[in-house]
Amino acid sequence: MLIRIENLAHTYARGTPLVHDALRGVSLEIAPGERVGIVGRTGSGKSTLVQHLAGLLKPTSGRVLLDGVIAHTRSSAAQRRKLALAFQYPEHQIFEHTVLREVAFGPRHLGLRKDEIAGRVRWALGMVGLDVEEMGERVPFTLSGGEMRRVALASVLAMRPEVLILDEPTAGLDPQGRRELLAQVRRWQEEIGMTLVLVSHDLDELAHVVERVVLLNDGQVAIDGPARQVLSDGPLLRAAGLDVPQPVALLQMLREAGWDVRTDRLLPEEAAEEILRVGGRA
Amino acid sequence: MGAALLLMALPFAAPSLVSSLLLVAFVIIGALLASVPLGALLRTLRTVFWVGFIMFFFYLFTTPGEPLVAVGSVAVTWEGLLAGGTQIYRLCLLVVITSLLTFATSPTQLAHGLEAVLGPLARLGLPVREVAMVLTIALRFVPTLFDEVDKIAKAQESRGAGVRSGGPWRRMQGWVPLFVPIFVSAFRRAEALATAMEARGFRGAHHRTRLYRLRLARRDLWATLIVLAVSLAALGLDRFI
C-alpha cells in the first residue's frame, strides 16, 4: 500500500488555553515494503503522526492518502484494515481470558472462517516465538511482561497487515528482550514483505531495522533520508534533541583524534570492521 | 466554601418564575466576579440538552388543563407549557450554578472544603479526612482515565474492533475490549499509587498539614451573607408575589 501524507497539520485542544500544535505541515510518501523509522524527541509529534497514518485522527488540515483514499473517512475502511498499529505498551490492550482468544480477536472481526482463524492464530504466535500448545490456553494476565507484549504483538500480526506500525515496541523490555524483539520484527518484514513503520527515540535500536529515517522536530520534518546519512549527522540530530548511535559516536571521536575512518557505520559490527580496516593491522 | 455549598443548594429551593430573574442576575454577577467566561458557562448546558428536551416534552403533554392545541386525544395545554418551561429553567440553573462552582474552584479546594464542612462528623467516628482524600485522588485521575480510554479505543479499533451493527447483545460485547483493559489499568495505577504513598510514609490522613490552607476570611463571610440574603429574598418573593 502506498501512503501519501500531504501537508498534514494537527492541533490538539483547539480553542482552549491548552492548544498545542503537534504537527505542522508534514509531507511524506511511504512506498510498499519500505522500512521507515520515525524519530524525534518526546513531544516532537511522532505518535500523532502514526495515528494519522492509521486513520485514527482527523487532520486539522492537510490529508493522508492510503492508496489514494483519504484515511480517516468511512470509505477508507478497506484500506485501514490493511494497516495495523501497535501502541506503546500494547499489552495494555489485552482483555480476553485466554491467549488464543486474544490473538483471534482481530481475525474474528475480519469475518474469517473458523479454521482460517485458527491457522492465523497459530502462525501469529509462531512469529512472536510463542508455542500454541504451551501458551494457548493460559490466561494472558498471568504471563510475564515480555510474554504479554508478544501476545499483544501477535494479536496485531494476526490481522496480516500490509503496513505494520510499531510505536516504541521495545519500551520497558530488558536488553535481551529488546534484542529478541527487534530480530523478530526484522524477520517478519523479510518473511511477509510488509511496510514497516517504526517509532523510536533509541537510534541504536532503529539502526538494526530501518533503511530510511524521518526526523521530526517540533511537528515538522527536519530531515528525511537514508538511515546511514541521517543517523550519522551529529549536528542535525543534536539540534533535534537526540544523539548519534554509539558506534557513530565512537567513530567520530576516532576521526577527531586523526584517524581516517568513515563515520557512517551505524552497527557495532560495521564500526569494528571500519576500525580494523584503518588501524587494526598493527 | 460554605457560600459555595449554599449556592449549590439554591436551585433545589427552586422558586417561581418571578424570583428567578433575581437568581439569574445573581449567577451572572457571580460569573463576572469569578471571571468565568459566560460562553463557557452556557456551553455546559449542552450536556443536559436531551434530558431537558424530553422533560419538556413530557410536561407538555401530560399536564392536565386548558388545551392549547389538540391532536386527537393528545393535547398540549397552557399549564403544560408553563410547567415544562419552569422545569427547564430549574434544570438549567442547577447545571449553571454547579458549573460556576467547578469553574471557579479547583478540585482540591472543593475536597478540602467538603472536608471542612463535614468536619463535625469526624467526631462521630466517620472517616471524613480519608473520604476527602479518596475524593481528591478520584478527581485527579478522571482526565488520566479519559486519556487511557481514548488510547485503548484506538488500539482496539486498529485491531478491527468497533461493532456498530448487530443486536443489543453484540453491541454490548463490543464494549468488553474497552472496559476490561481500562479496569486492569485503573487497578494497576491504584496499586502503584498506594505503593508510592506508603513509600513516602503516608499513614492515613491523620494530623496532615497542608501547603495551602483554606482560611475563612472576611470576604468569605460577606459572600455567605450575600448568598443567604439572595436566597431569602428569592424565597420571600415566591411567598408574597
Image (tube, coloured by chain):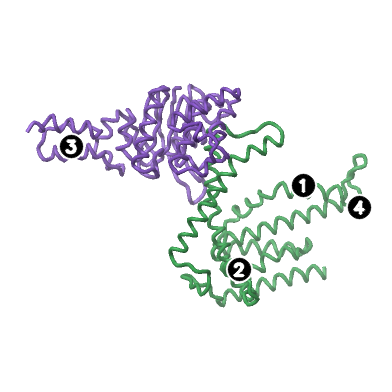
Chain colours: A purple, B green
Q: Nearer the viewer, mark 1 or mark 4?
A: 1
Q: Is residue B211 above or below residue B55?
A: below
- Secondary structure at badge 2 equals helix
Residue at the left extreme?
A: A282
Q: Can marks 3 and 2 be said to lie on one chain?
A: no
Mark in the foreground, 4 or 2: 2
Q: Position of residue A91 (x, y in %)?
A: 48, 41
x 77%, y 55%: residue? B87
The reply to whether the C-beta atoms of the residues labelled 1 and 2 are less than 8 Å apart is no
Q: Residue at x 41, y 40 (%)?
A: A45
Q: Nearer the viewer, residue A60 or B78?
A: A60
Question: Mark 1 or 4 closer to N-term?
Answer: 1
Percent across and percent down for residue B204 are: 52, 69
Q: Which residue is mark 1?
A: B54
On the image, numbered disc 3 is attached to which residue?
A251
The mark that comes first in sequence, 1 or 2, is 1
Where residue B114 is drawn, which disc sits there? 2
Q: Going by the image, does A241 lie left or right of B21?
A: left
Location of residue B116 with respect to A209 vertically, above or below: below
* Chain designation of label 4: B
Chain under label 1?
Answer: B
Crowd class of label 4 (few under 14; some 14 to 19; many from 20; radius 10 Å): few
**In the figure, residue A197 lies in which quadrant?**
top left
